[in-house]
Image (tube, rainbow, N blue to C red):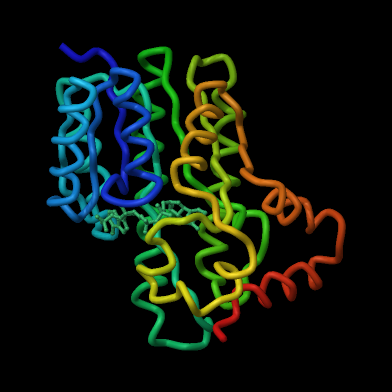
Amino acid sequence: MTKEWVLVTGASEGLGREFADLAAAEGRGVILASRQVDKLEALAADLRARYQVEAVVIAADLAQPGAAEQLWQAASAGRVIDILVNNAGLGRNGDFADLAGWARERASIEVNVTAATTLMKLAVADMVAQGSGRVLNVASVAGFLPGPHMAVYHATKAYFLSLSEAVATELAGTGVKVTALCPGATQTNFFAADDAEKATLLTKVFPLPSARSVAVKGWAAMKEGRRIRVTGLMNWLFAVSPRLFPRRFTAWLTGQFLRRR
Ligand SMILES: NC(=O)c1ccc[n+]([C@@H]2O[C@H](COP(=O)([O-])OP(=O)(O)OC[C@H]3O[C@@H](n4cnc5c(N)ncnc54)[C@H](OP(=O)(O)O)[C@@H]3O)[C@@H](O)[C@H]2O)c1
């Protein structure tokens, strides 16, 4: 019977798949959640076969009201969840004034902010009661910078980063730790899902790290109990740039990378 369970949101693609694999490789039971159930089922079968672990699939559209509460209830029924990987997320590249982008921007607020906060709150409450636990919040280097042409996404990640740090501070001495992983552009489906893969300089200028390499760093940071992990030298430079340069300049520069061309 599995004693240690990990809930991974957004496990059907990219970083989430890799987190699920890393958790299963350590012999933990995995609960895989997102909308694409066929991909989750295939991943669950693969993890069961390769690591002889329990793998559970839960369909969840986290942009829907109440979905995060329902997911936590289903995931934690009869199981103690030791690790929450709060990974599901999406962004929208385009001008803020363009109303056509609002549906996707709104979904990004629902998933990246509302659902992620809800899951974190429910997880932290249970983990404090049990005296241990880990939350790995997949934020972004975007959380350090305003992002012209991807303004709502950057704002969601600034919120998530701030929330993570604040809650990590509150939780000192409880046995529960919160880590914010802050990658930059990574080889996943993230930009293609927004039809933006070839549209911005961001994905063309620098060689993008693999999802595996980013997930490995995030997983290690979570196990070490680190509060923030920015991956990659360029991303670290982006993260500190608002402290070194006028904020107006940093926003302009970020906008050059994000502007559709
Ligand atoms: N790739 C990058 O460049 C990058 C950089 C920094 C941070 N991040 C962050 O990393 C996290 C993972 O993204 P990724 O790069 O792995 O992108 P991805 O390959 O597009 O994966 C995103 C995951 O989020 C899930 N998701 C999206 N909308 C959802 C919804 N309404 N309900 C439930 N799940 C939903 C997707 O699952 P379904 O489609 O099956 O629902 C998918 O599994 C995100 O939080 C993203 O902001 C990514």
Relative to 111, 229 lies left or right: right
For the residue pair 108 and 212, the one nearer the viewer reads as 212
Q: Residue at x 67, y 52 (%)?
A: 235
| Above-or-below relation of 166 to 104 | above
| Above-or-below relation of 158 to 162 | below
* Location of residue 96 in the rendering, given as x and y in whole percent from the top left corner: 52, 81
Instruction: Report the number of numbered marks.
Output: 0
Q: Quadrant of the C terminus?
A: bottom right
User: In the rendered image, which quarter is residue 123 located in?
Assistant: top left
For the residue pair 54 and 131, the one nearer the viewer reads as 54
Q: Residue at x 60, y 80 (%)?
A: 259
* Location of residue 129 in the rendering, given as x and y in whole percent from the top left corner: 37, 16
Relative to 86, 79 lies left or right: left
* Location of residue 27 in the rendering, given as x and y in whole percent from the top left corner: 29, 18
Q: Quadrant of the N terminus?
A: top left
| Above-or-below relation of 81 to 107 | above
> Which quadrant of the frame does ligand 1 lie within?
bottom left
Q: Residue at x 52, y 30 (%)?
A: 178
Q: Residue at x 38, y 69 (%)?
A: 192
| Above-or-below relation of 92 to 134 | below
User: In the rendered image, which quarter is residue 58 located in?
Assistant: top left
* Location of residue 9 in the rendering, given as x and y in whole percent from the top left corner: 31, 44
